[in-house]
Image (spheres, rainbow, N blue to C red):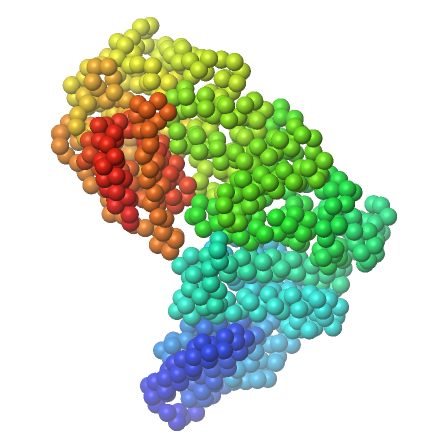
Amino acid sequence: MSAPRAEAPQALTKRLRAELAAAQSALLQDWQMQRKALSNIKGRARVVDHILRALWRGMGDLAGVSLVAVGGYGRGELYPHSDVDLLILLPDVAPAALEAEISELVSTLWDIGLDIGHSARTIRECVEEATRDITVQTNLMEARFLAGDREHFRVMQRTLRECLDREAFFTAKKLEQESRYARYQDTAFSLEPNCKESPGGLRDLQSIRWIAQGFGIGPSWSGLLIHQVCLPEELRAVRQAEAFLRELRVSLHYLAKRREDRLLFDHQEALAKDFGITAGSHQRASEILMQRYYRNAKIITQLNTMLVQKLGATFAPRPFAAPVPINARFLAKRDLLDIASDDIFEQHPAAILESFAIMQRHSELKGMSARTLRGLWAARRLITPAFRSDPAHRALFMQILRAPRGLIHELRRMNQFDILGRYLPAWGKIVGRMQHDLFHVYTVDQHILQVVRNVRRFTMTEHAHEYPLMSRLMSEFRDAWLLYIAAMFHDIAKGRGGDHSLLGMQDADAFCTDHGLCDEDRALVVWLVEHHLTMSSVAQKQDLSEPAVIERFARIVGSERRLVALYLLTHADIRGTSPKVWNAWKGKLLEDLFFATQALLRGHTPLQASGIAQRQEEARGILRFHGLREGVENALWETLDTSYFMRFDAQDIAWHARMLYHRPESPSPIVRARPNQIGQGVQVMVFTPDQKDLFLRILGFFARLGFSVADAKIFTTRHGYALDSFNLLDLGHADGIRDVVGLLEHDLAERLAHPGLIDEPMKIRLSRQQKHFPIEPEVSIRPDDRNQRFILSVSAADRPGLLFSVAKVLALHQINLHAAKIATLGERVEDTFLLSGEALHREDALIRIERDLLESLAI
């Protein structure tokens, strides 16, 4: 069966392993000296070719079997740590011993040091698999002969070509790309993209070449030019983008020392250094690198959209349908917007913006033709200062913003094809700009588009069920398009240095003036940009039970129209940062601030605005609903003062009364827990005679079990009892909610019954992001407006037990804690505490407290 081996198997394996290691070491040295990515990946493919052929010869001839490179290796490209994809092409009738010999071959390849992905099939099995699986069909399309029976390989190639349905292959590859885009959330602009698979990655370029190959053009880019699928300018752009991504991926593999295609925070700074990039005045080196990546990714998505559509129109045209004229410049052609002539944008520059306005008006259009997209891409250079200052063009842009439908689709299309960044130069500066605050998960331009989308959804009846209050307020708001403008400018000055809100105000003011907004509308937009962070800051960092807080915010707002506009924008902004940032608790804080401020602006007194009487009445109604007789709450309520009723809502007041009315002087601790009434998590109430380090002990218990405290309200009754309330979020416990409630009620009550026991939090584990982008803790202590208490502000990396660490320092210095506001912003927290204590009035003690807090927060 097999020819005698000239070299012993072990010796052959050892020799080839050494040759492979030496060759790969040489490739690394060559890369470090010259950084030629294409040479590197082609060189590794040649090295592996040599190893495989040498092994094949050393093992003897396998009769009728072919060794075939497929996938990227079939193209002759192997990145430093990519798998080696092989097809072992079997004869139709295989000898009994063949299976063992193939198994030995594969095992030896692993021993040599190659990561092998292999399949063993006959030609018939290859055809069957290719018919069922588009991935297999694509891999086989790039098959390359390595060793064995060459004629058998040629038969397979010819059979596969004959079986290929070009139009079905084209359709399948488009669907495959759509599925891949959906997996990566349709965006190239996440902060840790996959440079191979994400939209705008290398896979988008490969998809173009696969489709072209399926249509018989061949795998090279020059074939697209020869067949007039792409223009020379587009060919240059695609080659430049491909060269950048190749260099990035090779560098990433070498840095990670393994197959890694995700541009993780762990690698971004090292990659930037590898590219010779240094930090700028307002950007990290990694941010500069990533902005280059995002801009190349955007070019790739542009070209992919154009070229795939052009390939389909040229080689898989749909049945003829007569074009339907829309106007002198545009027509509808097979549900796509087409231009009347190739030079339409040169002859009528206003048609650049008009094309997007037409897409908004004609819902029957499913997109733009390849000719239109190509024309827009080339015409972006026509958007000059003179273009931007033309009143007709400004009117068209405002028409797009005011359109009743299609706003988000067209803004995204304008951004994708560089029209938006050309028309708004300030926008062009934020395209692809990263935000390394571990709070936003998108680049600045994509975050802004998310915020505009969120505001837009408030106007749409089909989304009214998501946030009913937002939808109702928006339905009553005059000229909702003003909020779209405010959303577009709220972060447009990010990365310039200085206060982006103030810089953004200037851009917004200039835009509104240039585009003819009246003074009232311009003032609203500019004010919203200036204060787009104010409402979230007040809601999450200040004590909303204090009338002075609401009065101060009401003075900033000034009118109910501004309040509603800011509420809508703030809600949309927080939800547009990251899926992890928004939660029901933040929504409740914003809602409480909104209604309290609205009451003040409508002429209610601060006491009326606080709604104490209304809350008490509503709480009584809840108690009666639960069957408690009238007046049972009085004994408890007599021990509570006004601040209690301002701090808790009616549901909480009624819950406390139901649990405590019959034992307002219980000698033993009472702990009650229930599912959070405003979202996920658990609400915990603790009622016990006040004692030393009580708050610290409670937090130690939560921290030891890994609970995250989202909100804490500390209250002391007139008769010396602590009535504390906690909202615990992100519990991360596998147990059901009922088990968690039972655990908290029993174990915490038992723990508090033994004074002096203080739990320590669970061991801290930093997130991967925090390790590479550490957050420097900040602490400040200042008197409140009445000079009665002090406000502690803490900004630090989030972690289990952080609140415990703060409370431990405060207890050490005998500081009383009255309230805690916990605001979690991605990986960062910005917490605010209301304090009192003798030490706070002494400068030397304040310095020691701040120093100790910083030490406790350092991780």
Q: Quadrant of residue 675?
A: top left
477 to 604, vertically: above or below: below
* Residue 486 at x, y percent in the picture: 60, 37
Residue 720 visible: yes
Identify the residue shown where x is 45% and y is 68%: 274
**As rendered, which of 624 and 57 lies closer to the eye?**
624
User: Which residue lies most toward the front here?
Assistant: 843
Please count the marks in the image: 0
Residue 712, by quadrant, is top left
- Residue 845 vs 639, above or below: the answer is below
Q: Is residue 583 left or right of residue 317?
A: left
Residue 418 drawn above or below residue 30: above
Residue 255, image x, y percentages: 41, 68
**679 and 842: which is toward the camera:** 842
Residue 377, placed above or below residue 33: above
Which residue corresponds to the image point at 39% horizontal and 36% vertical from the top-left?
823
Q: What residue is shown at x 36% (from left), y 48% (from top)?
A: 775
Q: Is residue 704 left or right of residue 195?
A: left
Task: Out of 27 and 181, give the one closest to the viewer.
Answer: 27
Q: Quadrant of the N terminus?
A: bottom left
Residue 65 appears in view: no
Q: Nearer the viewer, residue 66 or 425?
A: 425
**Residue displayed at 45% across by 21% down:** 551
